[in-house]
Amino acid sequence: MIARVENINQGILRQCREQIGMTFSDVEKKIPAIEGIEVGEQKPTFNQLSVLAKLYNVPRWVFIAESLPEEYQFDKTTTAFRKFSDDHIESFNDHKVRKLTTKVEQLRNLILELRNDMSESVAKFIVPKIQKNAAVEITARQVRSWLGTSEHFDFPQWKKKLEDKGIFVFVTSKYIGWSKIDKTLFRGLAIYHSVLPIIIINGSDSRKAQSFSLFHELAHLLRGESAIDDWDGHDHKRIEKWCDELAGNVLIPKKQFGSKASINDITEVKQISKLFKVSAYACLVRLRQLDIIDQKTYLEFEKRLKEEYGKPQNKLKKTSGATRDRPQEVLDQYGHIYTRTLFQSYYNKDIDLHKLGQALDLKRTSHILALGKQL
């Protein structure tokens, strides 16, 4: 006989499902009887509650509480829920995006809690002062000076530089799992906090494209705002256009671009993109900003790039698990701030090896130890 759980709070079950943005149809893929459970026609099993807890990003015990604890009322505790929902951003209405942002906010909170336990405060996020009427080229120079470089880097190097400035940069997984997000939902996402702000980059995108998204999201943080950005152009939005221009100016400074008058072949766009270690799309945006190509050419090249986009992604699905480097994957995804905080807490004996593995989503002890050596 299967044991079933008594005294489930049906209101909390519904509240948890609705706040994460899931419909009955979404949940029924995992729990076919969810509607009956919510209205009290059927009592759930312990296993079903475990599945629902994972789906809703809450601990299992909340389902028997008298009311949903405030820390799990995401519209109150999660910055993304408060900011994005007010703007009616379509991407945020997808439950996968809501679940991701909730989880990453929880990871950020864990960093702050562990640092507090170790009596190590996290410094306030201090950015260069942006003059309202300053040319975007001047702001880009300020950003590069703030980052302490005039060189061109690839995505991992840029990511590390932003982490050194106190930004929690999280990259979604390209493999099946809780953090895999379809590239059509968003390319990048920024959640502003005065301490440890968040940038989320879609890992299904190419590394060079991620660099452009990284600086586009940084531009939002410099403005003290949160935002979700997708593939489509932002010509109709003044702020998004400014963020694009700043990203382009940081990655491809105008004075380093040369004196090209025009470009008529997309192959040339790709060659230039390699020089600056950015994606062909980012290079295309920059060429348009500098009026080296006209709008007609831009749209034509963009269409061709979109047709090519996604073809390499199919190979990822066929990649054998045996070739995966899990410790490196975790470091690439969670970044140095999160992983170092966890390992420091482990070395201080504030958390044990099991909790360390859970927090890093690593099951093998050998993987955990290998990751520690990389730090």
Image (cartoon, grey):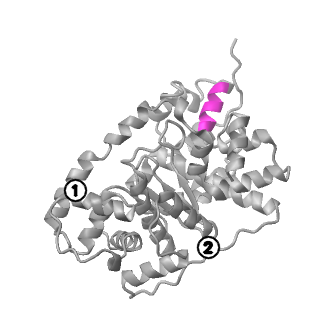
Q: Is residue 48 magenta?
A: yes
Q: Is residue 70 visible?
A: no
Mark drawn on residue 332: none
Local crowd size for mark 2, using a 10 Å CA cut-off: few (<14), some (14–19), many (≥20): some
In the image, the segment drawn in magenta is 47-54
Residue 125, label in figure: 2
Give the label on residue 267, or none. 1
By secondary structure, the bulk of the magenta-drawn segment is best described as helix
- The residue sitting at 60% across, 70% down in the picture is 165
Q: Is residue 152 magenta?
A: no
Which secondary structure, mark 1?
Answer: helix
Q: Tell me if residue 57 can be seen.
A: yes
Residue 235 appears in which quarter of the rendering?
A: bottom left
The residue closer to the viewer here, 316 or 42, is: 316
Residue at figure coordinates x 72%, y 56% from the top left = 341
In the image, what residue type sits under mark 2?
A: Phe
Sequence-earlier tag: 2 or 1: 2
